[in-house]
Image: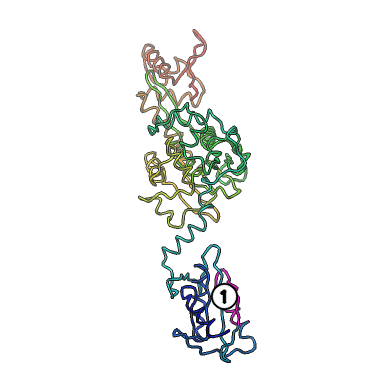
Amino acid sequence: MTRKELKDLIEEREHVELKSSLSLINEIIEAVSAFSNAEGGKIIVGVNNAGKVLGVEIGKGTIENLANTIGQNTDPKVQPTIKVETIDKKKIVIIVVKESLDKLVLAFGRPFKRVGKSSPKMSKDEYESLILEKHREKLQFDNQICRDIQLKEIDGSKVKWFLQKAKEERKFDVNPNISMKEAMERLGLVEDGGLTNAAVLLFGKEPQKFFLQSKIRCARFKGINGLDYIDMKVLDGTLPELREEAMKFIMQHTKHGVFFDANQRYDRWEYPLRALEEVLSNALAHRDYYSNAEIQLSIYDDRIEVWNPGELPKSLTTEDLKRKHISIPRNKLIADKLFLIKYIEQWGKGTNRMIEWMRKENLPEPKFQNTTSGFEVILVGPGKSFEEEIEKQKLHKLELNERQMRAIEYIKEKGIIKREEYIKINKVSHTTASNELKGLVEKNIFRKTGKGKYLRYELTQG
């Protein structure tokens, strides 16, 4: 190399860094990180900042050791091109660094950047922005184009239902009868002329044809240990259909207290249904759709567990979910659409509402926990005490007297009660017994069987 060639090279200072000696190995490696995270560049060793050639000692293994040291202290490992040149009988080393594809190369576990002629350390925010940019497509699965789907594979009736509901719930001003193409565009489900993954998951005729993982595996286990199950189903369909079918499975396999009097129906479920709807909506909106795993709904005697693939964002903790916090949806496009039909709350209040609904039923707060590859919500129920509480509530609301309550206990033990037996256990007149038994029938607690001397009373079911 001639002095003129070196001078010309040095003049490209934004892409060249000068180091006087190989002993400055840490600074050399930091410059490797900086150039990798920029547009690439060259590090010239053996030349000082004034451009004076000092030269370096090149022994056996010098270049090999230099390459190994750079590789061992960069992550991902950088393997630059290293050349030795001679100027005026002095050796210099030129390290040629290429631009990294994702610009996330660390030196000694820290990121560096190129600013003018120097290589300072990146700030935390700068590095996080690069990470987000690197994973942008992955983090926004729902916004990507589904290459294999055509407009004819979108269900028009589902789109129309959605637009009607969005209009009712959020005053979304789009005519439910517009064309399919316009509906997809108005909903923001078209990207570069193609339908997005979100469009398939929300309105596809067969969403699982494209995304097999978009299912909910439901099981009602026997007891509390999950060793055997009573019922198991794998649900498919669009996201709204998945939520509704999962709620039906829950309602089929949890206890329901319902009773009537002459004027009113009293209704109570073992778990607050609104809390369960929120859990399911969040699982569908925030799950990692790149994972092949399905959402899992597990019902036990004492609790309900909902697990979805994809942990909480690193900036959120499980404790944050119990207080005011920001919403960081993994699938923003899906979350926005579920918000339009009031399936989810967009401002990070959903978990707070779950806690509120559980407290209103005197149940423990939901348990939120990250697992190895996902996120789980556990709702602990009332267990065996539910039926006792319903019975007490029922008797209190229906304003029964002590004699009528005594008759209920008698039937529970004997199966039926006659009018004469009512008179005997309560020591009342024939007229009082008839009136009070009639009151129990009117309140739908007892029902009559037989006639005349064969007239009996038994408990109604439900």
| Residue 445 position (above or below residue 347) | above
Number of callouts in the render? 1
Q: Position of residue 43 (x, y in %)?
A: 52, 78
**Location of mark 1 (residue):** 96
Q: Position of residue 208 (x, y in %)?
A: 61, 39
| Residue 283 position (above or below residue 372) | above
10 Å neighbourhood of mark 1: few (<14), some, or many (≥20)? some
Q: Is residue 449 left or right of residue 265?
A: right
Residue 74 visible at all: yes
Q: Position of residue 267 (x, y in %)?
A: 42, 28
Dividing the picture into quarters, in which one does residue 354 lie? top left
Residue 303 is one of the magenta-drawn residues? no
**Observer-nearest residue: 167 or 180?**
180
Which residue extends farthest right?
60
The residue shown at (52%, 68%) is: 105
Q: Is residue 192 left or right of residue 319?
A: right
Three-letter residue code for mark 1: Val
Q: Which residues are magenta?
A: 64-83
The residue shown at (47%, 69%) is: 111
The residue shown at (59%, 87%) is: 86
**Observer-nearest residue: 228 or 94?**
94
Q: Position of residue 220 (x, y in %)?
A: 57, 39
| Residue 94 position (above or below residue 361) | below
**Observer-nearest residue: 406 or 237?**
237
Which residue extends farthest front?
4
Quadrant of the frame with the N terminus: bottom right
Which residue extends farthest top?
452
Residue 221 visible at all: no
| Disc 1, SS | strand
**Observer-nearest residue: 330 or 307?**
330
Colouring of the image: rainbow
